[in-house]
Amino acid sequence: MKPFKVTSRSMAWVACLSFSSAALAHHAAPAFFDVRDTVSVEGTVTAHRLSNPHSYFRVTTDDGVDWAFESGPSWTALAKLGWNELTVPNGARVRMTGNPALNGRPIARYQTIMVQGADDAASVMIFGGGRALWVQRAQDLGRDCENGIEACVMLEAVALETLRAEFGDNGVWSALPR
């Protein structure tokens, strides 16, 4: 048997195999989520797991359906934006919006999180939004969150009503699941 000779060609194959296995270990959102559709779920955060490569929030609706919302960014990336264990705590009343799972299960990749205040007159916090049309307007009407988190806006009740009137069923205000 001939001894194995390390050449630039064999090293190139090793590198290709290494990179391809890393790429397969992670998935693209369109492989699991309908990126052309949006669902919005209201309920209470009953659990969360802050981890890499994705964090998860379980939201239990008033009728008892458990939804799992996956973050797009890793926990490391969220932490760099200022997130911590108390950003969206268990027990918080939320409206989460995201791209639904292709298989129809109650799973989504979140786009926005609206953490509701103690009552209708209390301020709300909105996280995320990405390219949603209402994001700039929300920033104009609200103020940066005191928690220092990027892409977090505090809105008073009047500002929230203005956004609902101007944008209707869009972003945070998209229709509840069918």
Image (cartoon, rainbow, N blue to C red):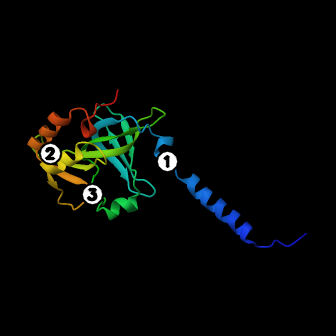
Q: Amino acid at mark 3?
A: Leu
Residue found 35% across the figure and 36% down from its top: 38
Dot 3: element: loop
Q: Residues within 10 Å of mark 3 (few under 14, many from 20)?
A: few
> Mark 2 touching mark 3, by CB under 8 A?
no
In this view, 126 is above or below 61: below
Q: Is residue 52 above or below residue 171?
A: below
Task: Tell me the SS state at disc 2.
Answer: loop
The count of marks equals 3
Q: CA distance from mark 1 to mark 2?
A: 37 Å
Q: Who's the residue at 70% across and 69% down the image?
A: 11
Q: Nearer the viewer, residue 100 or 133?
A: 133
Specify whether 20 is left or right of 38.
Answer: right
Q: Position of residue 44 (x, y in %)?
A: 27, 42
**Quadrant of the image for the C terminus?**
top left
Could you classify mark 2 by the number of other residues whose Cα lies within 10 Å: few (under 14), some (14-19), or many (20 or more)?
A: few
* Residue at mark 3: 86
Q: At x 16% / y 39%, what residue is drawn? A: 163
According to the picture, the residue beneath numbered tag 2 turns out to be 118
Pick whichever of labels 3 and 1 is earlier in the sequence: 1
Task: Name the image quarter holding the N terminus.
Answer: bottom right
* CB atoms of marks 3 and 1 within 8 Å: no
Quarter of the image for residue 84 reads: bottom left
Q: Amino acid at mark 2?
A: Ala
Circle 1: element type: loop
Does residue 125 appear to the left or right of 51 in the view shown?
left
Taking the image as shown, residue 44 lies to the left or right of residue 20, namely left
Q: Which residue is mark 1?
A: 28
